[in-house]
Image (cartoon, rainbow, N blue to C red):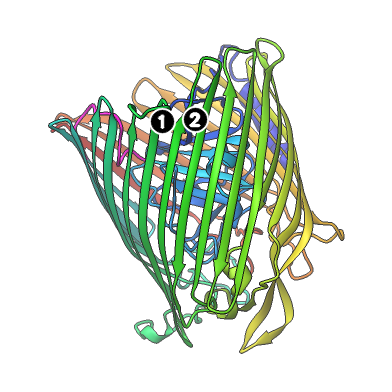
Amino acid sequence: MIRSILSLVVLVFSISSIADELSGIDVKSSVFTNSIEESKYPLHIVEDEEIYDVNSLGENLENLPGVSNADYGPAIGQPVIRGLGGSRTKIMLNNDMVNSLSHLSPDHQNNVNIQEISHIEILRGPSSIFAGSGASGGIINVVTDVISGDKYENNVTSYDYYSVNNGYGHNVTMKRNIFDTNIYFNINNKQLKNHNLPHGTKLEDGLFKGTLANSDYKDQNMIFGISMPQTWGYLGFSFENNDGNYGIPFHAEEEEEHEEEEEHRVHSKIESETYTVKGTINTIPIFNSMDFSFVDSNSFIREHEEDGNASLDNNMTAISGKFNLDSGDFERRILVEYSRTKSPMTSAYIPSSIAYDRSIAFFQRNLGKPYELDFAVRYESNSRDNLIQRYGDTSLNLGSSLLYRLSKSTNLYLGYSHVSRSPNIAELFANGSHGPTQRYERGNNQLSREVSRGAEIGITTEYKDFDIDMRFYDNNINNYIYLKDRTTSTGGKTDADWRQKDATFRGYELSISKSYNIASGLLQAKLSTDDVSAVFDDNTYVPRANPSKTVLSLQFDNQNNESFTTDLVYVDSQGDFSSTETQTNSYVCLDMKYTKGVRLAGSDMQITVFGENLTNSSQRNHSSMVKNEVPLPGVRVGLALSIDYDL
């Protein structure tokens, strides 16, 4: 299959002898408050038009080199960077902490709305150390303009509708600037039914099924924001409310004759409210400027199970201040952060706990040199407490990277990072039955913090109009924390312990891209592949390490406001598995999308037809905790309509 894909890409790259040079991507990362220029090398940017609203955050990013998705059914998708997921890959919203229970367990949804966003940033290296506590994998930063330091240039009223298989969704957005005040309002909802399964998919019980029970998802989200840009900076406020319900397909009952019987429904209800105040002051003494934010959020999950209910509640308060100390020779930032997360639990496998995280970070980049030298250092003091146990630690995290121009078209990248991660409350204090994972989890209050030492080398070059990006990395993690399944059970659920062992993650990422002028349009072609090996020091394999993948992406845009996109994905088999896992077979997936833009009655309208897994192949995701029980969806065909009104 790899040989077939390579043959296909050679054919594609041979279509035309006329190629346009792919220009570098100049990005002003919002992590640094839109001033420090990020080179394209350590950063992926995913624009809003590349996001599928029907998919989870992890599913939207999984085709990027070095990124995968640890799903727990169609509603849940945890991004994984270079084999590192959970709290090692930190998810942020507009540079702020996100109040979410997703880092405690893979069955919890990410508390981030991906509709009507500006873009998503994926960062690694010193910038992720500066902005994220324990982010040894990296940062996923979802960026919106709900609170904006710039005046809205245009009044926007938009309506989006999509339908896929047996589900649908609506989205309404309004943006106005009234008396130099930005006003933002968005409301959206989705109702997605149980997913179809590919023909011939066999579930764990040996039966063939056409649909995946309890894979449905309903959600309604409302966001209101107001911001006042001024000459001295800006001040803004936002409120977000989310109310959803999603099925837990892992231990769903077999298809019932009486589906209306609610007691047989296995699902989670989620609710959250988040208040945010943030702004910038440009007239502060000593510093060039100061950014500040205050986030107060409550996130609630009630897990409805056959044998009872459990409630998990997260009350988070986070404060941060970012100070600009730029000079003629350097760009510099200081970041001070504090957060308190109180987690009252009812009938849950984790006791009620409180987590405190305090940190101060410094970032510097040189100016006016033929190279970019970045340096970041972060000091942290963290604690995790419950009524009878306490954990606390301090750590010093640092990282540096060098981007050196070897020639006009070739750059060399070198990076090193030393990152510590404090255990979370589930890893420390869990002691009970967790229905959605079908495990009896036991934490360990003697766990030590993880220490990750990562080195990276890479090169970007242009050769005969091909853009080539190649990276190799080696990440040694002392005291890697993982969930170890045992052969025993308690109350019908598999016993699982949180343990530690030294591990090494090694891998590479390679992408080759080129663009062509064809007829009245531009064809952009990209071939990428990645691979990671995750091995413990005793030569056993780290559980749920994602296999290698190869992606061929083609996008053709013409002068008739039409866009054609195709992603052909080959995921290799995974034969490197732990003693508690089974081998995962390879599969091929084909996704396609066609978009047509038209002008209608004074408004801009876009019509999109898309299809996912058009090969309708039976797929298992090795990085998922429930790969055996929950196969990936079959073919999905959808229609999307987007209208921007000129009002």
Q: Quadrant of the C terminus?
A: top left
The answer to whether residue 140 is above or below residue 561 is: below
Mark 2 and mark 1: Cα distance apart in space: 7 Å
| Between discs 2 and 1, the one toward the N terminus | 2
What residue span does the magenta drawing correspond to? 144-157
Q: Left or right: 145 with respect to 624?
A: left
Q: Position of residue 388 (x, y in %)?
A: 57, 79
The answer to whether residue 372 is above or below residue 133 is: above
Q: Amino acid at mark 1?
A: Ser
The answer to whether residue 419 is above or below residue 50 is: below
- Seen at 53% across and 27% down, the residue is 332
Q: Quadrant of the N terminus?
A: top right
Residue 633 visible somewhere in the drawing: no
Query: How many other residues sit within 10 Å of disc 2, few (<14), some (14-19) or many (≥20)?
Result: some
Is residue 152 within the magenta segment?
yes
Q: Position of residue 273 (x, y in %)?
A: 32, 60
Q: Left or right: 127 with respect to 264?
A: right
Q: Position of residue 133 (x, y in %)?
A: 57, 49
Q: Amino acid at mark 2?
A: Gln
**Residue located beneath label 1 in the image:** 563
Pointer 2 with pointer 1, Cβ within 8 A: yes
Q: Position of residue 247 (x, y in %)?
A: 44, 71
Helix, strand or loop status at disc 2: strand
Q: Main secondary structure of the magenta part?
A: loop
The label shown at residue 610 is none
User: 376 or 542: which is nearer to us?
Assistant: 376
- Seen at 56% across and 35% down, the residue is 362
- Seen at 59% across and 50% down, the residue is 380
The answer to whether residue 193 is above or below residue 148 is: below
**Outermost residue to the front:** 285
Helix, strand or loop status at disc 1: strand
**Residue located beneath label 2 in the image:** 555
